[in-house]
């Protein structure tokens, strides 16, 4: 019976040692998970920054088209002429 107990103990130690070698320790798994989460956060931040930049560019392009359209509005021949005066500031 004692030999059987030693055999079971040796088999348990061998299987445990092998499983730990193959799977690694819990700490290593935790560290890898943290690294993966940091990588994911960085990618999400980069994609979000790209989307914000795209929205800002689209808004700026729309604003530019709006202002260029206002500058070249068609003239209504039936309305009286408007006089636009620009005041110049004295040179400092």
Image (cartoon, rainbow, N blue to C red):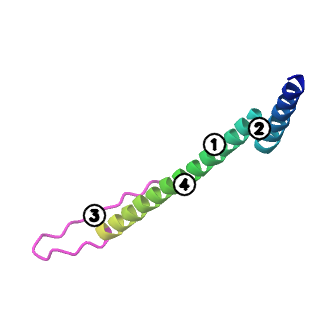
First in sequence: mark 1 vs mark 4 = 1
Contact between marks 3 and 1 (CB within 8 A): the answer is no
Q: Residues within 10 Å of mark 1 (few under 14, many from 20)?
A: few
Magenta span covers which residues? Answer: 71-92
Contact between marks 2 and 4 (CB within 8 A): the answer is no
Disc 2/disc 4 C-alpha distance (Å): 29 Å
**82 lies left or right of 61:** left
First in sequence: mark 2 vs mark 4 = 2
Disc 3/disc 1 C-alpha distance (Å): 61 Å
Residue matched to label 2? 28
89 vs 2: above or below? below
Quadrant of the rendered structure where residue 24 is?
top right
Q: Is residue 3 magenta?
A: no
Residue matched to label 4? 47
Disc 2/disc 1 C-alpha distance (Å): 14 Å
Disc 3/disc 2 C-alpha distance (Å): 74 Å
Q: Is residue 78 magenta?
A: yes
17 vs 47: above or below? above
Q: Give percent across and percent down for residue 78.
A: 9, 74
17 vs 70: above or below? above
Residue matched to label 1? 37
Q: Residues within 10 Å of mark 4 (few under 14, many from 20)?
A: few
Task: Select label 2 or label 4 by which is in front.
Answer: 2
């Amino acid at each position: 019976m004692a030999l059987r107990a030693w055999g079971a103990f040796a088999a348990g130690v061998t299987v445990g040692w092998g499983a730990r070698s193959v799977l690694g320790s819990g700490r290593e798994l935790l560290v890898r998970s943290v690294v993966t989460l940091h990588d994911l956060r960085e990618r999400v931040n980069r994609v979000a920054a790209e989307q914000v930049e795209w929205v800002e560019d689209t808004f700026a392009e729309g604003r530019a088209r709006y202002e260029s359209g206002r500058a070249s509005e068609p003239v209504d021949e039936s309305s009286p002429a408007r006089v636009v005066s620009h005041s110049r500031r004295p040179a400092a």
